[in-house]
Amino acid sequence: MSARSWLAAALLLVAANAQAQQAAGIDELLKSIRESSAQNAKINAEREARFLRNKAEQQAQLAQAEAELRAAEAKAAAVRGRYEANQKAISEFKAQLSAQSGDLGQVYAAVREAATQFRAAAADSYVTAQFPERLKVLDQLADPARLPSNQQLEDFWFLLQQELGENGKVVRFQAPVAAADGTTTPQTVTRIGAFGAIAGGDYLVAQPGGGLITPQRSEQPRGPAEAFAEAAAGEWLPVAVDPTRGNLFRLAALRPDILERIHQGGEVGYVIILLGLVGVGLALYQLWYLAIVGGRMSRQLKAIDAPQPDNPLGRVLACLKDDGRAHDPEVLETRVSEAVLRELPRIERFQSFLSMVVAAGPLLGLVGTVTGMIITFQVITEVGAGDPKVMAGGISQAMIATVLGLMIAIPILFINSVLGARSRVLVQILDEQAAGLLARRLEARIGEGGAP
């Protein structure tokens, strides 16, 4: 065979093998498709059977649920019927209660209102400090959510009678008393009705809840309080009482004392006080000096011929003691006037300074007034004028400075007037005696035959 023949035979053989392989693949594909179809059909059949079974169960469950729903609806209808019947019965009972009680509700309302008012009055009463348990009874009576029992009504009547009776009694009892620093100690308290209480010589202030406290500062003397607290039964002694049940004592404790008032005057107030103290000191010293000098001059008047150097009059009388009699009258008059003028500064000293203090005191007070008003207006600018307390500092400084200026000016004015009057009397005595001395010297010269 030729090569061409072999090649053709080989190609035929390859083509035959390819067709045989293709035919085998198609058969396998068809076989797998048939197997898949059969398996899917089997699965679908199982699903249909399971669905049919579930459908029957669901229908049974639905029927059971419908039966339970009908039973629940019937039970709810029965309960609703009983509820409506009960509501109707409650309304009937309320109507019966309202009809049977009549004015009892108004009585209970009046009792609650009275208990509330009495509770407010008893909260800071001195009687409550002795009987603190009565606040619990009043709280129960004032509760609007509960009706008072017969026992509580009786207790309320008892508390009212107790309040009336205790107002006229003076009793002693043990009670905790709080000091100004917060420490509490049990003390023997003497209660004066409902108007005051004393412990350890101090007037006590009642606190809400029945507590007692010693105020930080009291303007009442301790002596009468201590004597009254230790007095025997039936003994009559004077003692201070507060008809406002401690409010006046409480307000008195808030009043500033003298040092606090001075501090309110500020720097201007300190200057005024310093100036006033200096002026008063100098004025008192000069008064003492003039009194001593006046006494010595009075003694000197009784012994004109024996001048003493311990007083101005004696020194003036002694100014011509060592002089000769040949001087002219003008020279003698000049020497006497010089002696008098030499004594005037010590007699009239400090008067000009005191006059300046009298004039400067009100002016410094005016400076403090203006400064305080500036502070007040500054505060008003910053926080407004809604709260008067924020303006109290500036107003206090203004008023205190004015008062301080007048307080130093008025007494120093009177003292300076006394000094001026007393010094004028002494100067007049010096002038009279100096003139008399000069006249006696001239008379003596004329008597000796000399020229006048």
Image: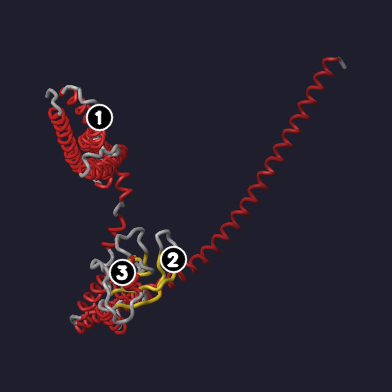
Above or below, comparing residue 288 to residue 42 in the picture: above
Task: Report which residue position mark 2 lands on.
Answer: 184
Taking the spot 79% from the left edge, 22% from the top edge, the residue there is 11
Residue 237: x and y in percent read 27, 74
Tell how many labels: 3
Is 33 positioned to the left or the right of 391 in the image?
right
Q: Image point 17% across, 22% down: which residue?
A: 328
Task: Place residue 118 in its image quadrant.
Answer: bottom left
Other residues around mark 1 within 10 Å, as few (<14) / some (14–19) / many (≥20): some
Amino acid type assigned to the residue bearing label 2 in the image: Thr
Q: Secondary structure at mark 1?
A: helix
In this orientation, does residue 394 appear? no
Indicate how the structure is coloured in the image.
secondary structure
Q: Which residue is mark 1?
A: 342
Residue 243 pos. (x, y %)? 23, 68
Mark 3 sits on what residue?
A: 224
Separation (CA) of disc 1 from disc 3: 59 Å
Label 2: element kind: strand
In the picture, the quarter occupied by the N terminus is top right
Q: Nearer the viewer, mark 1 or mark 3?
A: 1
